[in-house]
Image (cartoon, rainbow, N blue to C red):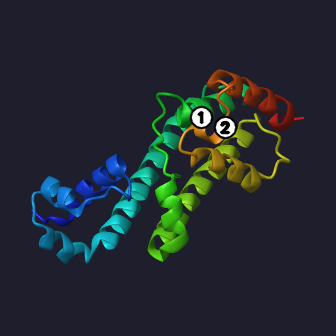
Amino acid sequence: MPLRQPILDAAVKELQEFSEAGFRVTRVAEEAGCVVSVLYHHFDNREGLIDAALIEIMRLEGDEVEATYQEFTAILAVVTTIEQAFETYVRIAHGSDGALRRSLDAQILTAVQTRPVVRQAWGELSAKVQRANEQLLNAVVERGLLDDTIDIPALALLLRGLDLSRSLDESVEQPSISFEQWVALMRLFAQRVMAPR
C-alpha cells in the first residue's frame, strides 16, 4: 500500500490536533507507520508536509461543501419563503449539526499569505464555495423566493464569507448574541431585503 496517503492523513490529524506550532514530524511518522526518512522522501521537509496537509484539509472541505449544498438543494424544494430558505441555509452550513467544516483559521490564513501553493488551494476552495452559492441563489430566484434584481455574485460573496468562517459564533464574535438571535435577524433581513418585490 502506498504510504503517501497514510502520511498525509496523519499530518492532517496532527495539524488539527496540535496546529503548526505543535506539529511534530515524528508523531506523524509514528501515526502513519513509517520512519521519518520515508516521510521526507514523499514531502521533502516539515514545511512541505504541512503545506500538503493544509491543501488536503481544503480538498476535504471542498468535498463537504458539495455535500452540504446538495443537502440544501434537496430541502429547498419544500421551502415556501425566502426566510425559510435562508434559515435552512444557515442551519445546514453553520448549525451545531452542520456538515460544513470550517477552514478559515489562523494557520491557513498565515499559510495563504506566505505560501503560494497553499494560496492556490485556498483560491480553489473559495471559488468552489462561490460557485455553489451562486447556483443556490439562482435556484432560489427561479423558485420566486428571491428578488431577481439582487446582484447574485455579490450576495454569493457575502454568503461565502459566512461559509468560510470557522464557526458562526466566531464570525459574529459577540458572546451576547446567541445563534437563535442571529438567525432571527437574518430571517428579517431576508424578508425585508431579499424577498421579491
Residue occupying image coordinates x 69% and y 25%: 176
What crowding class fits label 2: few (fewer than 14 Cα within 10 Å), some (14-19), or many (20 or more)? some
Task: Tell me where residue 53 sits by quadrant.
Answer: bottom left
Residue type at numbered disc 1:
Asp
Task: Tell me where residue 22 sits by quadrant.
Answer: bottom left
Residue occupying image coordinates x 20% and y 61%: 7
In space, the residues marked 2 and 1 are separated at their CA atoms by: 5 Å
Q: Nearer the viewer, residue 195 or 45?
A: 45
Determine whether 107 is above or below 85 in the image.
below
Q: Secondary structure at mark 1?
A: helix
Q: Nearer the viewer, residue 63 or 177?
A: 177
**Residue 99 position within the rendered picture, expressed as x and y whole percent measured from the top left:** 45, 37
Determine whether 83 is above or below 148 in the image.
above
Residue type at numbered disc 2:
Val
Determine whether 105 is above or below 196 in the image.
below
**Residue 59 position within the rendered picture, expressed as x and y whole percent measured from the top left:** 41, 58
- The residue sitting at the front extreme is 21
The label on residue 169 is 1
Determine whether 54 is above or below 166 in the image.
below
Q: Nearer the viewer, residue 188 or 173?
A: 173
Residue carrying label 2: 172
**Residue 41 position within the rendered picture, expressed as x and y whole percent measured from the top left:** 18, 77
Q: Nearer the viewer, residue 98 or 167?
A: 167
Residue occupying image coordinates x 29% and y 50%: 13
Looking at the rendered image, the quarter that the N terminus falls into is bottom left
